[in-house]
Image: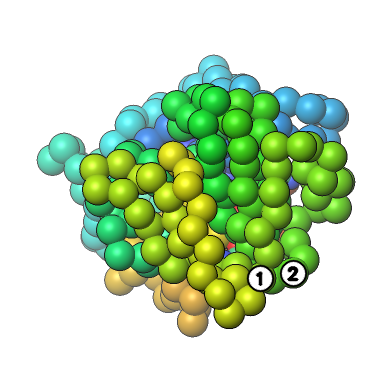
Amino acid sequence: MFDLIVIGGGPAGLTAAVYARRAGKTVLVLEKDALGGQITWSPKVENYPAVPSVSGMELGNLMAEQAMEMGAEVEIDEALRIEDCGSHKRVFGSFGAEYEGRAVILAAGARPRKLGLEREEDLVGSGVGYCAVCDGAFFKGQPVAVNGGGNSALQDAVLLSELCSRVYVIHRRDGFRGEEALVETLRGKENVEFVLNAVITELEGEEELSGIVVRQNGANREIPVSGLFVAIGHEPDIGAFAGLVELDDRGYAASGEDCLTRTEGVFVAGDCRSKRIRQVTTACADGAVAALAACAWLDR
Ligand code: NAP
């Protein structure tokens, strides 16, 4: 029986683990994929205080190492369901394992939003991807497209422009919502083309992606690419816990800045909760707030 089980080993969950360990609680972090969470997909993080520039992978690793060095236990396992047993919670993992904790922090983050196009699922791993840091190298010397107008899409495009023969940045508006500095960097690159006011309508290719069709200003345009990186935002990764906590109208765990939920002994932190600004720094802040609230609740 752990004092605290943290679901999710991203910046929110790992910060929560550090704070709870400092308060003398036993902590288990369950992570279904890679410790560090979504930040590990960021080629470069330049807005984390005191660290002018670091790869997301390195930052995530440092956070994980710190939490483990402080005594947090870590399991790579997906939490499929959480049962409220009154005095404690039971978490059911994906390999049949069960974990028990007196309190739980949900820090499950968010997952990439899909385009919802026909054959998108079939082509994942065969040209369609959601993580340029992970898969960009497979497309060295080849033409690729990035879809989206936020910082993720712009950062992906910068990374891919160093590797690929041509990078089409496809966005449904005539301006980007991501940082102007990134837009400027891309404008200065000869192998980058902005395809604006454009929506992808079709994915081409049988076994592997060979091109995309975009609808731009009322006309169809066919663009031959070997890779498409979809970076159109995220959705909460909280499906497995939907019955445990109240969700807001967008499917995020309903909570305020206090990271409390209406379920006794369950707290929420990071991108999976209702909030306006989703950044590494705000995720870490949530981790601290949720952990201290959980510790106070445990002590009571
Ligand atoms: P985002 O800022 O929400 O941008 C998503 C983009 O995808 C928007 O441009 C949106 O278009 C577009 N989009 C959404 N649904 C679409 C659809 N169905 N079809 C086509 N386009 C669609 O997401 P993000 O870029 O992943 O960033 C998320 C948060 O993380 C942001 O706060 C961002 O600043 C932050 N972030 C920070 C860094 C960093 O290093 N500082 C790096 C990455 C991300 P509209 O503009 O039309 O809505």
Image side of residue 132 versus residue 292, left or right? left
Amino acid type of the residue that numbered disc 2 sits on in the rendered structure: Asp
Near-viewer residue (166 or 8): 166
Q: Which residue is mark 1?
A: 197
Residue depicted at 48% across the width and 44% down the height:
225
Quadrant position of ligand 1: bottom right
Residue depicted at 30% across the width and 71% down the height:
243
Residue depicted at 70% across the width and 37% down the height:
191
Number of dots carrying numbers? 2
Image side of residue 187 versus residue 6, left or right? right
Q: Position of residue 123 (x, y in %)?
A: 30, 48
Q: Which residue is mark 2?
A: 174
Which is more N-terminal, label 2 or label 1?
2
Residue 221 to residue 166: above or below? below
Image marks 1 and 2: residues in contact by CB distance under 8 Å: yes
Image side of residue 270 versus residue 246, left or right? right
Image side of residue 16 versus residue 247, left or right? right
Near-viewer residue (187 or 284): 187
Residue 235 visible in the picture: no
Q: Position of residue 213 (x, y in %)?
A: 46, 61
Q: Position of residue 63 (x, y in %)?
A: 60, 28
Rounded to the nearest whole Å, what is the CA distance between mark 1 and mark 2?
A: 5 Å
- Where is the N terminus found, in terms of image quarters? top left
